Image (cartoon, rainbow, N blue to C red):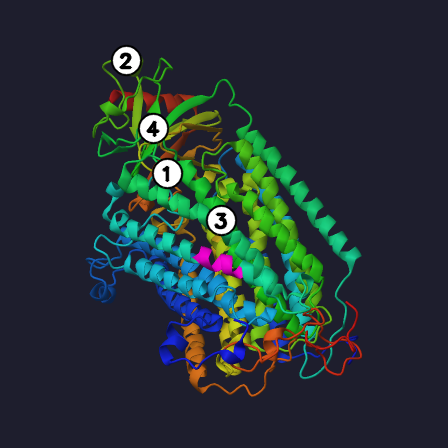
Amino acid sequence: MADGKGPGRMTLNGLVFGVLMAVLIIVSLWLFIGRPYWFPDLASVHGADIDSVFMAVLVVTGVAFVVVQGLLGFFAARYGAQGGERAAYWHDNPKAEAFLLIVTAVILTVLVFMGQRVWASIYFTDAPADALEVRVTAEQFQWSFHYPGPDGVFGRTDNKLITATNNIGLDREGDPAAKDDIFSLNVMHLPANRPVKVRLRSKDVIHSFFLPHHRVKQDAVPGMAIQIWFTPNRPGQYELACAELCGLGHYRMKATLVVDPSQEEYNKWLQETAAQQ
Amino acid sequence: MQDSHAHPQLGFWRKYVFSTDHKVIGLQYLITAMSMAIVGGILSLLMRLQLAWPAELWPSLERLMPVAFEGGPMKPEFYISLVTMHGTIMVFFLFTAVLTGGFRNFLIPLQIGARDMAFPFLNALSYWVFLLSCIVIFSALFVTGGAPYGGWTAYAPLSALTAIGSNQDVGMTLWLAAIALFTASGLMGGLNYITTILTMRTKGLSMMRLPLTQWSLLITAILGLLAFPVLLAAAILLVFDRTGGTSFFVPAGVIMNYQELSYSGGHPLLWQHLFWFFGHPEVYIVILPAMGMASDILSAFCRKPIFSYRMMVYSMVAIAALSFVVWGHHMFVSGMSPFLGSVFTLTTLLIAVPSAIKTFNWLGTVWGARIRFTSAGLFAIGFVSLFVSGGLSGIFLGTSAADIELQDTYFVVAHFHLVMAIAPLFAAFGGLYYWFPKMFGRFMNETLGKIHFWLSFIGVYAVFFPMHVLGIGGQMRRIYDPTSYNFLVEQQPVNVFITIAAFVLGATQLIFLANFFVSIFAGKRATENNPWKATTLEWQTPCPTGHGNFGPELPTVHRWAFDYSVPGAPDDFVPQTAPAVVAAKH
């Protein structure tokens, strides 16, 4: 064995390390295949694509994880030494290295393209023409939702008009288009199966518009108006969270998203909300 | 510094406190950073307490910290200041300091056969400025108004507006001062390291004969010199925004208390670009030295040459170069152009290739080895496992589409802790167990070292692996009370599990601290120069190494640093200084 060929010694430390690697692999398989906890239930159209990218990466990294941790554990268990035994003396294998380099590069390139196809479908395609538009304003520590009302036109807003009751500075007096606008604090309604454009602004610091069930996350940045779109496809009540640290009330900066089963019910909510204003 | 025998006997203060000896400065860095680690660690345990039992009252903690626990529960602003201070202390004042201040100072002259750094005084100055920065950041914990709570990334405008809350006033100013001082200290060190490695290598020590530790330290120093000034500039601009009425990072139209503030023309994303232009190379400033040290230690205890030395060097160079063009992957959903998102996805997955190559090479090193399971060797093997676990989750986050659902969740927390905190921590532990005899002339206790390894190894996986699951479930970072969200309540048992594991892990580190400090004075004496039978130059010097490092003659190097188990050689290692008679060709 002095030449490093043949099996090394099994040492207690090596075996324990090998067993721990086996445990790590089994626990990971349980966590990622058995899935005692997983993503919140999917509730949007594009979310399925995002989840499929996640799954593709999970398969690739999962195989790499099991193989590498498994080999490391196996080598540790098998190639132990007590004293002066000598290891194998080899330290280069250009062909194997080139092979591994190319395989890694090819797999990662495939992942890049799979991911970019989905990224492009989310960001580089415009929302369909029939999409609804909602203007969302984030501030410490609440969410304001602004709907255009029956005329379909958003009324003018002005920072100078902002008061405790007029959160977004809507110019109801000066702009006729603003008269029928609908404003809602911390409650957002959307009809199911209709694309929605969300135009995001922030009044103070950076916040992040996070709908975990819809696989939507977009920072709201003061000084910018950022538009994203998605299609909620499962009626129900969901939580909207702030995902970017925004101050001491960050953890309670949440709102409710209600996805109404039909356009009629959505309209009904709009009318009820308008009646209160 | 060429005249070792002319070194006069120095008194206590000049020898151990105001020293210009690189080894003393290295130890000063190590011990200062270890103290900071204790602070940062305690902060993280307080965070875990809150995350596991968010509604709990803590009367005993209230007695200890009356303001933070006023009335019984932890206050939300205190929680996010814990997050901020833990991150800042660990990234800068522990990891950057231990690896680029501690080990780098201690090891560079010893491993390249020099008597000291090129600029010993600058080196000492670098430490004292670092110590000052530690005092400043530590004091931020105690000022009226509280420690800053803008996160270690200090995103503007939250960090720019002093009116936002009392924590963001004096506390945030101290944070910026500490970062500026730290950066200045890092720059002084960096210049010194590069000059020393490039110009002061002993006879025969060509670049391709350097141990991987030295390559990693050289590359890291270059990264630091290019990245730290950007952070320094950003910090100064932020100070102007806060006190000088400028608007670099604050746009027009920001509203506080129904009033529009008088800023105009700034952009919040500018801060993020500047911060991450520094911040991503910073990740590699921490991980590269860990890779280098782990490689050398792994090879020494595998009794086998590192697999593919050349590829190891080239991949470190590639990682370093690419680290400057991946910063945007921190900003996929920040409002940055989605076209840039595509570019940064590509560069990010590109940087995974050299990282994968390094992993293959570590496996190639262990394959066919004869591993001596010392504490140092175990920590080096543990490093490989943890780096793989943390590195693979980076592929999810680097893929922009998958990042949409994972950004700012615990998946990110799990990823960066494993890859840039825990893996480097294991390499640093390995380094301490390995070089301890060279530092203090004694060994650390091996039995305690192994207990420390096994409990830590199980502990870090128990703490950080389940965090991936929390993140997949959607748990946001920096959230004071996860149970306030219905979609997170179901997975709260995972938070409790992690917290319990974290306390066990924290207690385990007491074993290490006791072992470390007791061994300095009472550890088993190291009677020979080269107790681990290693090849590199530092093992040709006595334990502990004296002032001037080497005897009257500087050593001459005849071979690379990895001649272990050379067929036909009398011993299973051939020191770098051994003449080329028995050498295998390299």
Q: Position of residue B461 (x, y in %)?
A: 51, 63
In the rendered structure, the answer to whether residue B21 lies left or right of residue B323 reads: left
**Which mark is on residue B227?**
3
Judge whether B31 appears above or below A237 on screen.
Answer: below
Quick check: is B231 in the magenta stretch?
Answer: no
Crowdedness of circle 2 by 10 Å Cα count: few (<14), some, many (20+)? few
| Marks 1 & 3 on one chain | no
Residue type at the position of mark 4:
Phe
In the drawing, what numbered circle is on residue A175? Answer: 2
Verify CB contact (< 8 Å) between mark 4 and mark 3.
Answer: no
Spot occupied by residue B270 in the image (x, y as percentages of width and height): 42, 37
Marks 1 and 3, how far apart at CA: 27 Å
In the image, which is nearer the foreground, mark 2 or mark 4? 2
Q: Main secondary structure of the magenta part?
A: helix
Chain at numbered mark 3: B
Classify mark 1: helix, strand or loop: strand
First in residue order: circle 2 vs circle 4: 4
Q: Give me the C-alpha separation between circle 2 and circle 4.
A: 19 Å
- Is A244 situated left or right of A27 in this image? left
> What residue is disc 1 on?
A207
Whether residue B191 is in magenta: the answer is yes
Disc 1 is attached to a residue of which chain?
A: A
In the figure, A160 relative to B365: above or below? above
Query: Which residue position is annotated with label 4?
Result: A145
Q: Amino acid at mark 1?
A: His
Which chain is mark 4 on? Answer: A
Q: Which residues are magenta?
A: B186-193
Q: Are marks 2 and 1 on the same chain?
A: yes
Query: Residue B505 vs residue A12: left or right?
Result: left
Whether residue A25 is visible, yes or no, is: no
Q: Nearer the viewer, mark 1 or mark 3?
A: 3
